[in-house]
Image (cartoon, grey):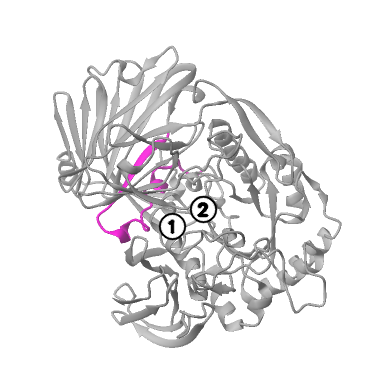
Amino acid sequence: MQKSRPYYIMKLIPLSLLLVHFAYFGYSAGSNTVSSPDGTIKLAITLGKSFSYSVYHNDRAIIAPSVIDMRIAKAGNLSGNLLKPKIKTRAVSEIIISPVPEKRRKIPDVYNEVTYRFTNSFGVTFRVYNDGIAYRISTFLKDSIVIESELAEFNFPSNDVLYYPQVVPRDNQDIYHTSFEEPYHIKHLDSISAQSLLFTPVLAVSAAGPKFVITESDLEDYPGMFLRSSEKMGLKGEFAPYPKKEKILDGLYSQRYVSEREPFIALSKGTRDFPWRVIMIAAEDKQLPANDLVYRLASTSRIPDVSWIKPRKSTEEWIISSNVFNVPFKSGVNTDTYKYYIDFAKRFGFEQVLMDAGWSDNNDLFKITPEIDMEAIISYAKARQIKIGMWTLAMTLERQLEPALDQFNKWGVDFIMTDFIDRDDQKSVDFYHKIAQACGRHKIMLMFHGAFKPAGFNRTYPHVLTREAVLGSEYNMWSEKATPDHNLLLPFIRMTSGPLDYEPGLLSNGTKAGFRANPADVMSMGTRTQQMAMFLVYDSPIQFFSGNPSQGLLEPDFMNLLGSLPTTWDTTIVVDAKLGDYIVTARKKDNNWYIGAMNDLTPRELSFSLTFLDEAIYDATICEDGVNADKHASDYHISTKTFRKNDKLTIKMAPGGGWVTKLLTK
């Protein structure tokens, strides 16, 4: 893959090391093996009547023989002629420099690769890393092609336990229409119905030992990959067929729905690379939240100048319905309320205020709500050096794209959200690229809601700072789904595919017994400190504070600490973690360190050493669950302390609790 020089440091491999790398490729008639650079992962490739692969971790199978195939109209199948392929290998050791570092600025990209080129104009490339494997199909055909199907098998040697979200069918709607926001099911593979349509990432707990996540990367001009259970004790990819007919359902949040689909999945150019099929492998739970394999596999940045991209923290008023209090004006979607948010943002270190749904007619971005004086809000924000972000309905933005972006430029708006896409067939995937390219031309940052997982999109378009595809804070308005148990699965599953917009920071908090879904006074299930810890544990270069600013003004110490947390990181270390139970994440920004810990509904005490710190003295500000947080979830305690490298910490977390510290060098 050609590397874009501004974001890469190339490392030359000495001849002696190159000879060692060749030892990781093995060949015999009809089968080949490729090992990871450290030798812990082995990929076995078999060519016969079909093209299949197997994956081993420490010589124990975690993926049983699984077939790769693709069928193209008039060109036939990939497996149609597997004789005498041309085979190329290479060993790569590079450093990717991320312009918007979600986990780390310098990303090692080290792998062994083998590429097959067949006489029928198909090819397959495999990469084997120390933390996973990936493969992609390529074609070398003239003119345009019709892809009828793709076979992507992930067969297991045992009845593994899977953690997966699945599509909930909507009445009288296409099965592939989903917001990609569902809780996780935890079942053995043989208990999953063949009727269940799973969306990725999906986590498997292997009887052989490691855990692994199945997902994809570099998704472009092609539908996203769903999964279904198969008769072979495994999963197989399923892809939304190409839309033949669409209908518009008008309403407050108008959308395009597919009413009829074609008998094929994609129309494309004949010579191209298809998305990577990715398996991230972790011997220890803590390796999954730190894994950035999906980012490494994605296409390099298409934004030549990234200097205008400014990650930040923002307020968000939609979840609490702008229900501020202790104010002399009527709260709501109006000028006075947004000025109040701007003052709050300025006081506590938030760089942006998002104007969510309601600032305009959802179906016409130029029909501004009468209670909104946009010029007054823009002027007020500019005087206080606060940026304004804008919500848009995806269908409306597409229809009014260039005029709307011109208007945002005139207002000085450099960030927008677009919402309610809820599909990942080829046409909707193309929409993401279209909007990202347009926003890039206008130097406007972007976030997608009602969206599928990032799948490496954030590397190709670094101004697309984050994405939803997560059951997050808004679900507290109407359900009990956003539990601490759910929150403790997200770093190990959803976050492996890229940044997520959970929108934490709720300042009304309840225990499991005391939680109530109440849109008039939205609370989290879990403690106040867990809400703060999410800003450090969850990857997102733009973090949205969804709490009530009126409550925040009553607790300035808490808000000053929260407002001081960065959103991008030079280094990330997951100190300790257990899937679904707890996580402790340490992040470095410049010379300072930040540690966030989150806990499920079991009270917990953890100890760890600060071995990762530099040789310095650190002044620490600590926010921890209060002594009564098990009964009153909003109870917290803020203190200060001094730390040095190798000091040992013992932290206590209440049920659904958290722990946060900011360590500043003296």
Q: Which mark is residue 73?
A: none
Residue on which the image places disc 1 = 490
Dot 2 or dot 1, earlier in sequence: 2
Q: How many numbered marks, from 0 up?
A: 2
The picture quadrant where one finds residue 177 is top right
Which is more toward the observer, 657 or 368? 657
Which is more toward the observer, 37 or 237? 237
182 up-or-down from 332: above or below: above
Identify the secondary structure beneath mark 2.
Answer: loop
Left or right: residue 181 versus residue 552 is left
Residue count near mark 2 (Cα–Cα under 10 Å), binned few <14, some 14–19, many ≥20: many
Q: Which x, y percent locates residue 350?
A: 62, 69
Q: Residue at x 53, y 33 (%)?
A: 425
Left or right: residue 499 versus residue 46 is right
Quadrant containing the N terminus is top left
330 up-or-down from 360: above or below: below
Look at label 2 and name its amino acid: Val
Q: Circles 2 and 1: CB distance less than 8 Å?
A: yes
Is-magenta flag for residue 256?
A: no
Q: Which x, y percent locates residue 48?
A: 21, 21
331 up-or-down from 111: above or below: below
Residue on which the image places disc 2 = 470
Q: Residue at x 35, y 21 (%)?
A: 122
Region rendered in magenta: 275-301
Q: Residue furthest top?
A: 74
60 up-or-down from 68: above or below: below
Quadrant containing the C terminus is bottom left
Look at label 1 and name its amino acid: Leu
Is residue 171 at least partly visible in the picture?
Answer: yes
